[in-house]
Image (cartoon, coloured by chain):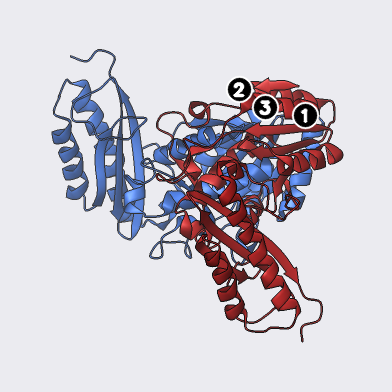
Chain colours: A red, B blue
Amino acid sequence: MIVAQQVADARQAVSDARRSDRRIGCVPTMGALHPGHESLIRACRDECGFTVVTIFVNPTQFGPQEDFNRYPRPLEDDLAICRRLEVDLVFAPVVDTLYPAGFGTFVDVEQLSHTLEGAARPGHFRGVATIVLKLLNIVQPARAYFGQKDYQQQLVVRKICRELDLPVEIHTCPTIREPDGLALSSRNRYLDAGERRTALSLYRSLQLAEERLRSGERDVRMIAGQMRQLLEETGARVDYATIVDPQSLDELTAPAQNMVALVAAYVGRTRLIDNLPITIDQLR
Amino acid sequence: MIVAQQVADARQAVSDARRSDRRIGCVPTMGALHPGHESLIRACRDECGFTVVTIFVNPTQFGPQEDFNRYPRPLEDDLAICRRLEVDLVFAPVVDTLYPAGFGTFVDVEQLSHTLEGAARPGHFRGVATIVLKLLNIVQPARAYFGQKDYQQQLVVRKICRELDLPVEIHTCPTIREPDGLALSSRNRYLDAGERRTALSLYRSLQLAEERLRSGERDVRMIAGQMRQLLEETGARVDYATIVDPQSLDELTAPAQNMVALVAAYVGRTRLIDNLPITIDQLR
């Protein structure tokens, strides 16, 4: 496994692989790898001849009051996981490498990046779009893998790739959950035992939405209110709890065939998100 | 010569050329080709094995009151020029191909794109940066060629390529002028005979700046004032006339070894720009 810190070294490794006709796949991560990331890496390994994992805690997607400094950075553990999964190249640059002094080029995605996570975290998707574009330009993969847990993020990434004409296929892999349903997240390690119990209410609220919709309830706003109530009763502080169109993320007022329920809430100091696509074959 | 209107056809032609190990060069233009563009195409042909010219009048870089609709589009003449210069591929898409309904991804360059042309034409460089990134992603050239006549534009393009990690070399080619000094521009064809005479004052003002600086004058602001005066005396309406740092475009208050004089002015309804790099080996 090659570990590159410099852009030129990463490019060289990828370019060598490309010359031997291996399809390049890329899994962009912020490290603190968990089985959710592992599933992305496995999907990449199954479909591509050369698997690149990028590990970079991207400062431009964190707000000034957010957890950039305390975000976990267990690089040696991450490299061990990558070795075990037979990753070909890990690109793990330091901040100054990707954002040298005077840096000032950013990618903005209208609408999609200003709702939900974008509304709660101003500038977040500007940072995400910019770093993803940079990493994809460095690695130039045929495919890149993102988790469905960050539902809005993979939509934003798909949009920038499509609209900026990047020749890359975006694959979204299913959310991986703990046995009790909690979506895996690097931020789960912030939770103490009590918070860990409270955190389960995110998934429970999504299940509640699915049950109500499947049982034929047509008042979508009322269901969203019930999601919020369930979260608040367990002590979570809700950022949003909503049922939206899977592409536009516009809030729904009536059930549709395809929907996504999305939640974001603080559990203690830790902000968690989760989502559940809901499909109803026969609208009543 | 291949003429492609669709992204997939352009990509295919480039990909075939790349497989036969030809270095890809790209000259992005808005068409209405003149000898300035021809010099870019010739430089590309000299240095690359496969020359791509893109022809696209990019709506997102025009302000609502600007000349997008009347901008010249002599496509048959342009294709004849490209054939004569042995261009390999012309990519000439229609607007909807590059900006389908719902398009909303833009590249923003801080500072550099908000001064001078960016101040006079809000959003201009956002449009330029976005279309250049799109075209470079479609063509994926090893080198791309821009004219020095659009001095700030080539700086912005260099910055986005550097900061977004595009693996492309930007080459800037010297401004081509009429025998009397008028910089070639597709917009010169808007000028009537009287305006054509007035238009010469742009270059004259740049020459004035160079003479004064070479003669040892140290009051840069006074020189800028004289440039403006010269332009106004001929009936041009000045947007800016200034002497700046060649990289930051910060206005200079004292002479430096390397400077650029930049002017923008309306001659009748037509907005023209020009610039002159000025180097003084021995500052007094």
Residue at 40% from the left image edge and 32% from the top image edge: A102
Circle 2 Cα neighbour tier, 10 Å, few/some/many (<14 / 14–19 / ≥20) = some
Asked whether the residues under the numbered discs 1 and 2 touch, taking CB atoms below 8 Å apart as contact, a structural biologist would say: no
How far from the left and from the top, in percent, is residue B57?
54, 56
Front disc: 3 or 2 = 3
Residue type at the position of mark 3:
Asp
| Chain letter of the residue carrying label 2 | A
According to the picture, the residue beneath numbered tag 1 turns out to be: A87
Q: Quadrant of residue B229?
A: top left
Q: Quadrant of residue A72?
A: top right
Cα–Cα span, label 1 and label 3: 14 Å
Label 3, secondary structure: give it.
helix
| Chain letter of the residue carrying label 3 | A
Q: Quadrant of residue B84?
A: top right
Residues A67 and A191: in front is A191
Front disc: 1 or 3 = 3
How far from the left and from the top, in percent, is residue A271?
52, 51
Q: Which numbered disc covers residue A30?
A: none
Residue type at the position of mark 2:
Gln
Residue at 39% from the left image edge and 36% from the top image edge: B179
Q: Earlier in the sequence, mark 3 or mark 2?
A: 2
Residue at 58% from the left image edge and 80% from the top image edge: A222
Q: Are marks 1 and 2 on the same chain?
A: yes
According to the picture, the residue beneath numbered tag 2 turns out to be: A5
In the image: residue B69, left or right of residue A150: left
Taking B144 as reference, is A223 above or below it?
below
Residue at 51% from the left image edge and 63% from the top image edge: A238
Quarter that holds the N terminus of chain A: top right
Quarter that holds the C terminus of chain A: bottom right
Residues A247 and B176: in front is A247
Residue type at the position of mark 1:
Val
Taking A10 as reference, is A137 above or below it?
below
